[in-house]
Structures are given as structure tokens and as C-alpha cells.
Image (tube, rainbow, N blue to C red):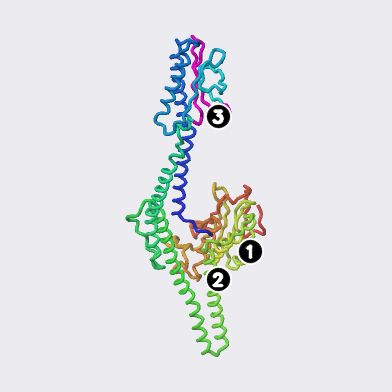
Amino acid sequence: MKVRSIFVYTVFLQTVCMLLLWGVWIVWLKYAYLPDVSEDFNTQQMVIARGISDTLKDTPTDSANFQQIASALESMYTNAMRSGLEDESYDPLIAILGSKGEILYSNKPDINIPLKPNGVVRFSEEGETWYLAYDTDTAVNRTAVVGESATDRHMLIGDPASGTAVPLLFILGTMLASTIITTYLSMRPLRETTQSLAARNPGNLTPISMKHQYNELRPVLRAINQLMQRVDAGNLREKQFMADAAHELRTPIAAVLAQIHLLKQIDDPAERNEITADMEISLDRAVSLSRQLIDLARLETEDYPLKMEEIDLSRELSHTIAMMVPYALRKNIELAFDGPQICLVTTDKQALFSIINNILNNAVKYCPPGSLVETTLETGHADEIRIIIRDNGDGISEQYRPRLFSRFFRVPGGCETGSGLGLAIAQNLAGKIGGYLSVTDGLQQRGIGFVIHISAHGVSALTRDRSTFTTDDDNSGT
């Protein structure tokens, strides 16, 4: 892929702007300046034609002086126009026409001059274009005509575009050179910042100083500083994560090593079986912890794959709770479900029910016998639906609730052991499917509850009929 250059792009834009200005100037010359100048020349011709008419007004046409005076006026006008010109080829047309258009006088008798009303007209004769100014003296029925060829007019006006081409090219070249120099100097702060960043050590994530920085660079540098802060915070989290993971894995592995050492010294089959069972428990814990660490690492990547599909959330929740019943019955724990009969949602089914299973498992695992675990599906909220899982067990102290979604956090004093990763994984999964988890109060002013918030944008259909399900029922029903 071709690498683009801001320097080249800036110079290109400024050059295009200069060329556009030059083009505008040429268009102005052609369509505004030159027509105005030509109109001034037409006015001048009309003045001359009027002057000739006034001069010959009292001279009869058949008088001998008529031709002499007309010729003298022609010479005076021609000499006046030629004065100051390097090229004395200027040759105007001077004619006097009668009332019927007959030529009474003309310095160019070979040109057939038409009779026109007062004003200036364009007239072509034998490949030459003429600008003819007419002035009629109604008192004597004579019309004075002063003509100027397009060639002569072009010679008088000149060619401003071609005449200024060389100076303009010089100016354009000077401006282009100035543009390149100023652009290069303007890019110097960016080059200095780039060199400063390139000279840093790979692990140096300290913020770039904003002091003495240009306003145009501040948003970029501020964004870079924020990015480095996030990377630094992520690195710290990863270091802490690795330290915690190593510590958590060290415990079951150390236990297995100690048990292996003990196993070598014991010959009693019963004791050996007991030690082997303890080793299996420790290894299962290590395997489970390793699996959860891998799951958490996958969740924290940006490209975590999702498989979105439409599901009936009410039916799937009922099925999930029903699958949990044997486990709950072994601990004498009652399960209940309350929600709409149908709730169609577009989401990642596997991710969502991984969250639900995690919370339900925790509830059944940590609640004492005789407890109630209730799952409620609420659809009456404007922008979200909520899955609320609450129990009336021992609960969790308020001081520990803010840390429940932290990695490796376990409530102090708990009789059950765990990795402390389950809720952290659940919170990450919820974020991937556009939701989040929150903590709420439990049932009967006891226990604890968790709320799974799901965006209502994924809800395609809801019914208001509600269904209930408990482990005391033979089957679910409305």
C-alpha cells in the first residue's frame, strides 16, 4: 500500500489553490474585463461619430468642401489613434451615408456598409469583423459611421493574459517555493514529536508533555497519552493477573507435590486411596482454574466471536432451571421461575446461558439446605430486559459486594472454595453481548441477588402472559 504524505498533500492543495486563482483571474479577464474595455471603445466610437455628424451638419452634401472636410476628419482621427502606437497599421473606417444608405463618403469604398440605427453593431465583410458606430443627424438625413476592425481593437486592447503570463509564472514559481518551505517548517513540530516518540524505550509509557505544544498537535498528543495510559493500566492488570494466576495455580500444584511425596512413604492401601482422592481434587481444581484462566483471556481479546440467534428466553430459562433441579434437590434447595410465557431475544445463547448457569450454580452451591433460589424474567423496562436471580441464603456483606466481579476475589470466611473467577468471567461475557451484571438484595431481606441486564434492542417479541415454575411443581405451567 502506498504511504501517503501530509507534506506532499499540503503542497498539492496549496498549488491547486494557486492554479484555481489563476484560472479565476483568466476567466475574469475574458468575461468581465475585456467586455468592459470593449464597451468603452464602443462609447468612444459613438462620440467620434457624433462629432463628425455635428461638424458636417452645416455642410451640404454637394458642396466641394464636404469631401475635403470628411477626409480631414478621417485623417485627424486616424493620426490621433496611431499616436503612441509602435505599429501604425491602425486603419479605421470613416463613412457618411445618405438617407437611403447610399455612400456619400467612405475611406473604404469596397466595403458595403449597411444602414443601421444609432448604436454600435458587429459587421463582417470578407472575413473581417468590424465594430460600426452609427450616428444619424435627422436634420440633414445623414448618418456618420465610424468603424474599427476586430484586428485593430485587439491591437489597442492587447492580450492581458499572454502579456502577464511570464510574470505570473514567475510569481507562481515563487509562491510554490514559498509554499514548500513554509510547509516544511510547519511540519517541524510533528517531526520533532515523532523523533521524541521513536527515541523512547519500548516500556516507556509516561505521558508526552503538553507544555509548549502547538494547538493543532494537542488533540493528537492527548489521544496518544490516553492510549498509553490505557496500555499502561492494561499492563499493570496483566502483571497482577499473572501474579494472581501463578499464586492460585501454585496452591493445588504444591498440594499435589506434597501428596505425591507422602504417597511414596505410605504403604497402607486405605491411606493411599485417600491421598489419591485428595490429589484428584487438587488436580481437578488446577484444571478448572486453568480452563477459567483461558476463558478469561479469550474474553479480554477484542475479536471474541459471537453467534447471534433468536431464542425464546422464557423457554430456555425454564429448561436450564429444570436441568438444575437434581443438583438442588440433593441440597434440599427450592428453585423457582417467574416470567413471560414467551420472550424472543436475539443474542449469543451460549454466552448468555454461561452467565446464567454460573450465577445459578453459585446460588445452589453456597446456599444452605432449605433455601429458595428464585429466577425472575422482567420485560417491562423501556430499554432493557432483566434476568434476576435471588436467594435467601446467608448472603454477602455490603463491604464485599463492590469487589464481587474482581478477578480472584473470594469472600473471606466462606466455607466453599472456588477460583474467584466465575463472576469476573460472567461480567466480561455480559459486556460482549451488550449487557452487564449488577448486585441487588436477596429474598426475604436475606441472601443476595444478581441482575443480568440485556439490551431491549435485541428483543423481537414479548407476551404479557406469565408462567411460573418451582421444584415443588410436577411440571411447569401458567
The residue indicated by pointer 1 is: 323
**Circle on res. 109:** none
Residue drawn at the location 47% of the way across and 26% of the way down: 39
Q: Residue 196 lies in what quarter of the image?
A: bottom left
Q: Nearer the viewer, residue 238 or 273?
A: 238
Q: Nearer the viewer, residue 192 or 380?
A: 192
Q: Does the magenta stretch include residue 147?
A: yes
Label 2 or label 1, whichever lies nearer to me, is 2
Across and down, in percent, residue 386 comes to 55, 53
- For the stretch drawn in magenta, the main secondary structure is strand
Q: Element type at marker 1? A: helix
Mark 1: which amino acid?
Answer: Met
With respect to residue 71, does 269 lie above or below? below
Mark 2: which amino acid?
Answer: Arg
**Residue 118 visible in the snapshot:** no
Quadrant of the drawing holding the N terminus: bottom right
Which residues make up the magenta segment? 124-151
* In-image side of 294 versus 183 (left or right): right
State which tag comes first along the sequence, 3 or 1.
3
Q: Nearer the viewer, residue 398 or 262?
A: 262
Residue drawn at the location 52% of the way across and 67% of the way down: 297
Q: Element type at marker 2? A: helix
